[in-house]
Image (cartoon, rainbow, N blue to C red):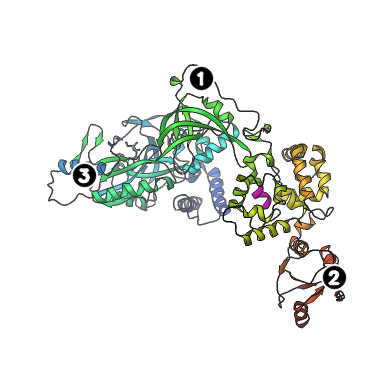
Amino acid sequence: MSFLERAAALRAQIAAHDHAYYVLDAPTIPDAEYDRLFRELQALEADHPELVTADSPTRRVAGRPLDGFAPVRHAVAMLSIRTETDTTAEGARAFDGRVRRELGLADADPPVVYAAELKFDGLALNLRYEQGVLVQAATRGDGETGEDVTQNVRTIRVIPLRLATSSPPPVLEVRGEVYLRRDDFEALNEAARSRGDKTFVNPRNAAAGSIRQLDPAIAAQRPLSFFAYGLGQTQGWAVPATHSGVLDALLALGLPVCHERTVGTVEDLIRFHADIAARRDSLPFDIDGVVYKVDSLSLQSRLGFVTREPRWAVAHKYPPQEMLTTVEAIEVQVGRTGKLTPVARLSPVFVGGVTVTNATLHNASEVQRKDVRVGDTVIVRRAGDVIPEVVGVLPDKRPPGAVPFAMPCTCPVCGSVAVQEQGEVDSRCSGGLVCPAQRKQALLHFAQRRAVDIDGLGDKIVEQLVDAGIVRTLPDLYRLGVLKLAELERMAERSAANLLESIERSKQTTLPRFLFGLGIRHVGEATAKDLARHFGNLDALMNASIDDLLAVEQVGPVVAESIHTFFAQPHQREVVEQLRACGLGWAEGQGAGGAAALPQSGKTFVLTGTLPTLSREQAQAMIESQGGKVSGSVSKKTSYVVVGADAGSKLDKARELGIATLDEAGLLALMHGKALVAQPLSIPPD
Ligand code: IVH
């Protein structure tokens, strides 16, 4: 194979994989293999620059920044579309009525067939393919002349650089909308926010800004998408007879076409409008309505244009996702992890299908940059399931005397100091477990299976316990009684007893589980194990200096600071002391051993009779803390039967099945990792 053939083969393969990955969402090869093909093509082209073609996937990689965009005169003007402002079903009927009148149809004549599709909220583009190769991409501009954005458009992965056909037409211009998915937009803004950078107002602005970005390297980092919805100039292409046929043909050529579309009579348009309205929030991208087009292209040309709008198409809108309203107050909410979020209280406004009365302002630096003040007129956006946000202020409408917002230095809920960590934009309440706003989350975190594991302490119960003021801090959990629990709504006696049993069992835990359960910021399970291993016991950790903490492998300055701040607060130490006083405990000095290795995992124990010192619950907790299971009856699957005084039929059964038996001393030895030599049975005297 010649270099030329190899390069062509690589290009075809890469284009096919791009299509599978970006358009069909069904990758055909692993990323590493794709990268290998790509690098091979890059190397070939570097060695033989004469092999480079306009449609080479390597051209997607951004070129030099531009000074400006060259004007492009459109071969066929890019028109706009009439908007039907009546958002009810009547909007579609009015359009059908106009079309029928223009076509001179009587009531008795058959219905007109329409194509319905989405009205994407992005930026219109004209893609020009010559001999199947993308040679130019232009914005709409004033409809006559747009801007040459070819370099940037080449970086959009869903746009094929070459059409998927062996006999391409000399000229095919495809029109469509470049847009940004909502999740991509949120991620882009989230990243900007965490850097303290300016955010985009909405996906449309972000898409438009990216396409008109003079540095293609930046444009290339924006995850833009595209849907084709029509044609510009064509030469030598057998244009299908219908609009829906055109879209099918474009799809077959490898262009992305949205599958949310339908063909039918005015009744189908009405159904489509209602169906999409109901699903608008769950679409992955913003739309501002649906578009109806007369399906037959010959009827389209009979209908023609009025001024700059075709008579054969209409945009049937939905209620807007952005509206103006005024800020009545700015309050600060405390999130479940202590994050302080400024929230604008708004004059009620109907936006994105719901009445919005408050909207997030994200964080202090965002409020400052947008300079949102009480009394301001603001743009509120609510799209999809995303929480409403204030995206901008109308400075001209600011009332005199409006003052800039200042983030409080203390938590508005518990009064603890609010801290802003270095390099972070968010302020957090340092109150942790004593802050009621964080209490519920803290309790759930502490009770979760990977922490001290209180089976049965879920969302609902925690909610009730905290709201009723029964549980304020973690130690309160260990002071609960059946009576207290029975006060709770829908708490049956049996479940109350079960919960108390789980709480009792959770007292026997391990240091890593306990540490993780405290919910110290940046201390996950792995860090908790590292800390336990390093310090060996809780007191050493609680009294550790920043330097001591930095000596722990995997612990950097941010984590060290967080741990140090946590234990420097008297109320946190108090919580820890109270938990210990309540009987929470673990074998100290064993480091992570308890949690990292679960030596009894997979083993089943049966307890029978009364042990000399351990209660049944203590024995069970001990076994379970090491991964063992406690069962009520002896079977072939039982690993050990633990025998105390007055053991009954379970001991007989164990003997019958030849199952190993242990007394309390044997159990303790096993739990402390001592090798167990076939333990001679010692049954306490009756
Ligand atoms: S057709 C001659 N179809 O809406 C008709 N336009 O005012 C040309 N748009 O900026 C437009 N989705 O970018 C058409 N499915 C769709 C569309 C759509 C969005 C945009 C288009 C243009 C505006 C028309």
Disc 3: CA contacts within 10 A as few (<14), some (14-19) or many (>=20): many
Disc 2: CA contacts within 10 A as few (<14), some (14-19) or many (>=20): few
Q: Is residue 307 magenta?
A: no
For residue 676, the mark is: 2
Question: From this viewpoint, which residue is outermost toward the bottom?
Answer: 656
Viewer-nearest of discs 1 and 3? 1
* Residue at the disc numbered 3: 96
On-image quarter of the C terminus: bottom right
Q: Is residue 3 visible?
A: yes
| Image quadrant assignment for residue 319 | top left
Q: Main secondary structure of the magenta part?
A: helix
Query: Which residue sits at x=75%, y=52%?
Result: 512
Ligand 1 under 8 Å from disc 2 Cβ: no
* First reached walking from the N terminus: tag 2 or tag 1: 1
Specify the amino acid type for callout 2.
Leu
Q: CA distance from mark 1 to mark 3?
A: 51 Å
